[in-house]
Image (tube, rainbow, N blue to C red):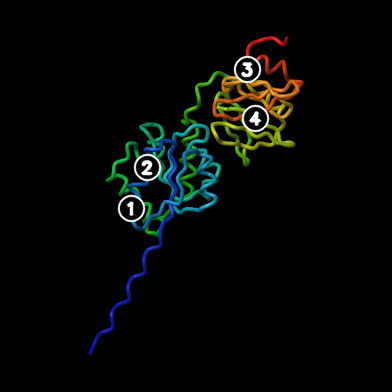
Amino acid sequence: MSLPTAPNAPAAPVIRAVVVDDEPLARRHLRTLLALDPEVTVVAECATGMEAVTAIRLHRPELVFLDIQMPELDGVGVAETIGARAMPLTVFVTAHDDRALDAFRVHAVDYLLKPVDRGRFALALGRAKDMLRGRIARDPARFEAMLAALRPTRALPTDAPGERLAVRVEGRTMLLRAREIDWMSADDNNVIIHAGGRTLRIRDTLSAVAERLPEGFVRVHRSALVNSARVSEVRSAEQGEYEIVLVDGTVVQSGRRFRDAVYSLVGRNRA
C-alpha cells in the first residue's frame, strides 16, 4: 500500500526589482549580486532619478535599490516624486554620509554603504524579502519621517546664485544646473529642456524661462535658445540663417531676425 505524497510547496513569487545608480559599475555590481538569487529579477536599471521615476511607474516593482546621491533628482527626490506611501520597498545605497546614515538608522530604513559588501547585501535582501512576505511589518510612517529628516541634509549644488533653474515637472519642483542645459525649444505653451541627452517638458514660455537663466544663454530663434558653452560650430545657411551645431552634434536652426545674437556666439559684430 502506497502512502500519498505531500504536495510540493508553491514556489515563492518572483520579486521584481529596479536598480538605480548614476555609476555604471555600481549598477553592474548590484545586478550581479541580484542575479545570484533566483527569487529576484531585475526589470529595469536606471542611471538618473527621472529614469527611475519612469521605470517605477511603468514596471511597478516590489523592490528598489536606490542611490541616494545623484545629480538633479536624487534618491530622496525620486521617493518624493513617487510618493512615500506609493514607493516600493526601498533599500538606499550611499557613499559614506554620516547625516544620511543617521537618518536611516533612526528610522529603521535599510541601506547599503558603498562599496557594497556581499554579506551586507545578503542581509538587506533577506530583510526585504521578509518585509515583502509579511514576516516583518512595513511602516510607511517611518519612511515618510526619514525622508523629512533627510531634506535638510541633502547636498545642494555649489553653483553661484542664479545658476540653478527651478522648474515644475509632474507636480514637483526640480533644480537644474544651468551649465548642464544644452538648449531649449518652444512647443506651444510648453518649453522642452534638452540636457545631456535627456528632455524635460515644462508648462511655461521660452521668454519667461530665458529671464531666469544666467548669462551665456542666447536666443537664436523665436522658438529656440542655446547655451553658448555648448556650441561647437556656427554654419551659414540659406537666406541669412545659420545652423548652430552643439557639442553633442545637435543642429539648431537660427531665425533671420536673430543674426546679431548668432554673431555674439562667434564673438564678432554684424557687418
Q: Which of labels 3 and 4 is toward the front?
A: 4
Q: Nearer the viewer, residue 11 or 44?
A: 44
- Secondary element at tag 2: helix
Q: Residues within 10 Å of mark 4 (few under 14, many from 20)?
A: many
- Spatial distance from mark 2 to mark 1, Cα to Cα? 20 Å
Residue annotated with mark 3: 215
**Residues at badges 1 and 4 in contact (C-beta under 8 Å)?**
no
Residue annotated with mark 2: 28
Q: Residues within 10 Å of mark 3 (few under 14, many from 20)?
A: few
- Secondary element at tag 1: helix
Residue annotated with mark 1: 126
**Vertical arrangement, residue 86 with respect to residue 151, above or below:** below
Q: Nearer the viewer, residue 244 or 159?
A: 244
Mark 4 or 2, nearer chain start: 2
**Residues at badges 3 and 2 in contact (C-beta under 8 Å)?**
no
Q: Position of residue 94 (x, y in %)?
A: 39, 36
Q: Say which amino acid is labelled 1.
A: Gly
Residue annotated with mark 4: 184
The structure residue drawn at horizontal position 54% and vertical position 31%, both measured from the top left corner, is: 196
- Secondary element at tag 4: strand
